Structures are given as C-alpha cells and as structure tokens.
Image (tube, grey):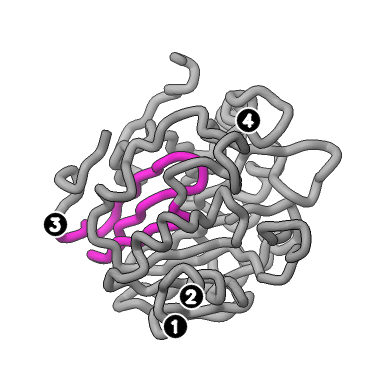
C-alpha cells in the first residue's frame, strides 16, 4: 500500500500513478493533479459495483494535491466521501458544467470550483487544462440523466502535452482534438466495459487504438479496467486485446501495476495481468 511518504514532497516535473479504474495522480511541472478520485465502490450502495481489487492508496494517505479534475458525475468517477475529505484543502477543482453544484453540496467552496464547457480552458500555474468532448452521458439517479456535462481533458505543461479520454464511445471528436491540441506525449485511454448493445458508451479495443492514432499520441496509457466489473466480458479481455493491437500497430504501451510510479517513456512496465 502506498502512503504519503511514497510521494515526493515537491511533485516531480513528469510522472504518473494509476490507482485503479479511472483514478490517477499526475505530476507535471511540479504540480500534482488528481483525476476522478474513487477509493471505494462504484455504486450508491455497498453491494453495487464492488471493487475487484483494493485501492493501492487510501484517501487519508493522499499527498498534497493542487488540482482535482472530474470527468463526469457517474459513481465510478465521482465519489462523495472523497470530495468531502478534500473539500477543505487548498485545491482547485475542475469539473464539467453543472457538476460544480454537486461538489458544493459536499462542502467544496464555490470559489474553489471551475466549471468548463467543451473547448473551454483554465490555467493552474504553468498548466493549461482544457475540457473536450466525449460520447457519453451523465447522472447519478433515475431522474437526473444528462443534467450535467461530461468531458475529456487536455493537460498541457511547459514541455509535455497529455490527453485524458474520460468515458467515451468512438467518434469524430478524437480527430478534432488531435487537430486542435495534438500531438500528445501521452494519452490515457479508457479501454473497458464495452458491449455491442451500448456502442456509444465506452471504447471497444480496436477503437482504443484508432482513437490513440486520431489524437496523435506517442504513448498509450490504458485506464478504466480491472477494478470494477461493469460489463459482461472477462476482466482481462480488454487489456489483452489492446496490448496485442498496440503491438500490431507499433503503438508504445505503458501498463503499470496499480500504485506504481512511472515516468512515461522511461519506466519499463510489464504485462502484470497475465500473471494473475
């Protein structure tokens, strides 16, 4: 298990820690960014969408965070208990339109929240953070579907340009993002929970590869897998297929174990899911 002591007191210029599913810490230009922080289950009740693997970091052991980015308000991306824990910290919260109201309801002061529509940007020190489109939906109950926006993000520092896909089906938005903001040094792409019955919700493995090419990403970092059972396929089917397709298409893949610190382009990772 990670603890606060495992993180540098001053965030590094470039590193990433995947904490499972779509939760990650990115260190860029000496800033520490936390994305979609979920440390428990992915549903409103304990028996719904239980974790298959324990988070490598307890929320109480989080290091100092500068920015929290939320992609959308689904339970597996926005956890009330974690937002309440972070609410009184010196953090800038960035979220899609109308999600700020939820954050305020959990104690985050309004002046700490920046809501973004697609193609709107905000800065934090040397970082420029831009919300971009995805093909998805939002809502936390039966009566609030699509009352809030969902987004992917471009996170651009002094030297590195990163893309975070959020949850999305495949669409022309990837090419548009590539044209407007690419090329990218690294693309965090969701790879799991696909089903032929809902093609506009998540990426199929072959679409992960196409999307990475569309945005012109140098390195592909798979996320949104192996933590919650959200679809009918086996938990390791997506990562096996994406790894094979990436190799066939000469795409560099980075696949850290949960909690492992990686410097993309330098740190060597393994096919750890094949050893389970």
What is the secondary structure assignment of the residue under circle 2?
helix
Which residue occupies the foreground of this view, 199 or 175? 199
Front tag of 4 and 3? 3
Q: Which residue is mark 1?
A: 110
**Magenta-highlighted residues:** 10-37
- Magenta run includes residue 13: yes
Disc 3 crowd, CA 10 A, few/some/many (<14, 14-19, 20+):
few
Between disc 4 and disc 1, whose residue precedes? Answer: 1
Q: Tell me where residue 129 appears, x and y as whole percent.
A: 46, 72
In this rendering, position of residue 131 left or right of residue 204? left
- Marks 2 and 1 in Cβ contact (< 8 Å): yes
Q: Which residue is mark 4?
A: 238
The residue depicted at 72 percent of the width and 71 percent of the height is: 147
Between the C-alphas of marks 2 and 3, the distance is 29 Å
Residue 266 seen: no
Q: Tell me where residue 224 appears, x and y as whole percent.
A: 56, 42
Disc 2 crowd, CA 10 A, few/some/many (<14, 14-19, 20+):
some
Q: Which residue is mark 3?
A: 9
- Quadrant where the N terminus sits is top left
Residue 104: mark in rendering: 2
Q: Residue at the top extreme?
A: 275
């Amino acid at each position: 298990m990670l603890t606060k002591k495992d993180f540098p007191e001053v965030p590094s210029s470039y590193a990433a820690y995947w904490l499972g599913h779509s939760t990650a810490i990115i260190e860029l230009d000496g800033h520490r960014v936390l994305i979609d922080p979920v440390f428990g289950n992915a549903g409103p009740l304990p028996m719904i969408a239980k974790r298959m693997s324990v988070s490598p970091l307890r929320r109480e052991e989080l290091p100092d965070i500068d920015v929290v980015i939320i992609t959308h308000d689904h339970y597996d991306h926005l956890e009330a208990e974690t937002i309440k824990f972070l609410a009184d910290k010196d953090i800038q919260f960035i979220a899609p339109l109308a999600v700020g109201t939820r954050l305020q309801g959990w104690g985050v002061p309004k002046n700490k929240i920046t809501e973004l529509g697609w193609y709107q940007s905000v800065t934090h020190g040397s970082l420029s953070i831009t919300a971009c489109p995805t093909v998805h939906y939002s809502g936390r109950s039966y009566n609030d579907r699509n009352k809030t926006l969902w987004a992917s993000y471009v996170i651009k520092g002094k030297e590195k340009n990163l893309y975070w896909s959020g949850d999305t089906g495949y669409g022309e938005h990837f090419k548009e993002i590539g044209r407007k903001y690419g090329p990218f040094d690294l693309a965090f792409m969701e790879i799991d929970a696909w089903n032929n019955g809902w093609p506009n919700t998540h990426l199929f493995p072959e679409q992960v590869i196409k999307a990475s090419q569309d945005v012109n990403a140098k390195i592909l970092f798979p996320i949104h897998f192996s933590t919650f059972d959200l679809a009918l396929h086996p938990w390791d089917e997506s990562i096996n297929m994406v790894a094979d397709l990436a190799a066939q298409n000469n795409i560099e893949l980075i696949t850290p174990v949960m909690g492992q610190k990686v410097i993309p382009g330098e740190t060597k990772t393994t096919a750890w899911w094949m050893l389970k």
